[in-house]
Image (spheres, rainbow, N blue to C red):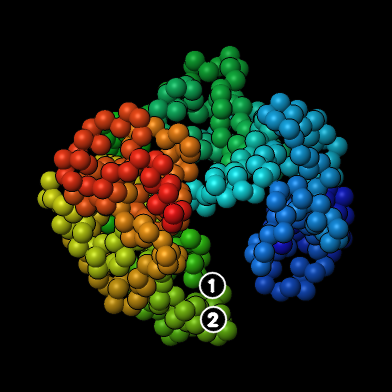
Amino acid sequence: MRGEVYMSKADFFALNERQLAKGKKIFANPRNAAAGSLRQLDSSITEKRPLSFFAYAWGDVSVETWTTHGEFIQLLKTWGFCVNPMTKICGGVDQALAQYVHIGEQRPHLDYDIDGVVYKVNRLDWQHRLGFVARAPRWAIAHKFPAEKAETVLNEISIQVGRTGVLTPVAELEPITVGGVVVSRATLHNSDYIVEKDIRVGDRVRIQRAGDVIPQVIEVVDDGQHAQRDVFAFPSNCPICDSHAVREDGEAATRCTGGLICSAQAHERLKHFVSRNAFDIDGLGGKHVVAFYDDGLIKSPGDIFRLTPEMLHKREGWKEKSILNLMAALDAKRTIDMPRFVYALGIRHVGQATARLLAKQYGTMDRLRQAMLDARVIGSDALEELLSIDGIGKAMADDLVGFFDEPHNAQVLEDLLASVTVESFQAPSTKGSPVAGKTVVFTGSLETMSRGEAKAKAETLGAKVSGSVSKKTDIVIVGPGAGAKEKKARDLGLRVLSEQEWTILIQGL
């Protein structure tokens, strides 16, 4: 069963009263209290916390005996699960929006916190057709309520440096409670945002928590003194390593050029490397790798796997059990799947979805590395193959090629691969699929399905969907208005199918 664990407001206030009576720290809000309760390593502590659960979906079942999501919700009730009483089947957009308004009106009176509603397609056959993009379903979407706003004073603008060298301005605020959380810092995004909003140190500003989570400054509230304050001068040098900070044409971001000499970038890259969606090493969080880096224990990702018990014995907070647990966790991560490994490298513009695309296209790290080196040659087959991957454009291709071409990155990668085994990408079984392993291109208008739906279906059958036609393309599916791609396919003698012929092929008729 899938659902959401939460803590009611009444239970939250009662918990904080008990915490105060015991002289312990109180929780900021019910969300933090619930999340903290679930993260306890000692389950007996979790057991004592007043947690509740709303069920709303299933994880894995032997067979779906229901045809709609609504039917399943009713089954949940008969099985004894608690279902949110405001769940409703709506007959159209107008009814769905009316329910959104209704829930928004009831929001202050509910005994639990919510930040919006989720609309879902009811029919399961339509859910299956729509499928997923990356990790999100195409058949569900969240509609957030307007964020809560508050006013406070901006005391200072500090600059953070990220793993790719981006300088991000941060508003240091007079602490204020917004949506039950004390906010003292908020993002200012980039230099353009500061100029556009004319934000100055000392201003009174209006802030909000976007999605009830991320604090942001939305506007300046003129207190009559704004014009007398100094305009903020965005730094031309990195505040960490003092290297030049430059802004490339067409980009909003300003970047530190210090690269490897910039400790802030090294910190963030190592934190990214051990993050949850990358190597996710139990017992080794971001604060640990920063401390290890600053004390000279590690300088690169490969050093993490060379940590020994002797190196940690006299460090504060590291006892024999925690050290043994870390050593076991490191051993467990010496073998990792290719998408996680590629994502962990922290290549600019390469997120989880792109890392999976690359793993699927090239299969092994050796092939990916060689292909990126070969793609340095303009007009090469390797570059054409990279650019043909649906979702990878020129800017991302340049970053990929540049990453693998940079000598220090190659050295770091070799060093890491000496300690880590990257498993070859294993695509889901597509046995019996007539298009498994084929590269396909859709062009022109599709009449019986959307372009996104067609691509998703092809990928589930083991095909590689490309955005351009080349001699490596196996099948081109054409619709009305196909144009140049159809002409090129026919000139190259490729297999060209109509939408109907494609449908017949994948149905095995």
- Give x and y (percent) for residue 302: 33, 72
Pick the residue in front: 20 or 256: 256
Choose the circle earlier in sequence order: 2 or 1: 1
Between 43 and 218, the residue placed more toward the observer is 43
Of the numbered discs in the image, which one, if any, rests on residue 218? Answer: none
Residue 238 spot, x, y in % from top left: 33, 44
Q: Is mark 2 in CB contact (under 8 Å) with mark 1? A: yes
Disc 2 packing (10 Å; few <14; some 14–19; many ≥20): some
Q: Is label 1 in a helix, a strand or a loop?
A: loop
Q: Quadrant of the C terminus?
A: bottom left
Is residue 494 rendered to the left or right of residue 389? Answer: left
* Residue sitting nearer the eye, 10 or 112: 112
Q: Vertically, is 114 above or below 318?
A: above
- Identify the image quadrant of the N terminus: bottom right
Q: Secondary structure at mark 2?
A: helix
> Position of 92 compared to 484: left or right?
right
The quadrant in which residue 428 appears is: bottom left
Could you tell me the amino acid type at mark 2? Answer: Asn
For image coordinates 27% across by 52% down, the residue present is 474
The total number of labels drawn is 2
Q: Position of residue 490 (x, y in %)?
A: 20, 40
Amino acid type, residue under disc 1 in the picture: Gly
* Residue 174 in view (yes/no): no
- How far apart are the two marked residues, 2 and 1, measured between alpha carbons? 7 Å
Q: Which mark is residue 325?
A: 2
What's the residue at 13%, 50% (across, down)? 380
Q: What x and y, as percent, mark residue 348?
A: 33, 49
Left or right, residue 227 beside residue 213: left
Few, some or many C-alpha atoms within 10 Å of disc 1 (few <14, some 14-19, many ≥20)?
A: some
> Which residue of the protein is positioned furthest toward the front in this rendering?
509
Picture disc at residue 283: 1
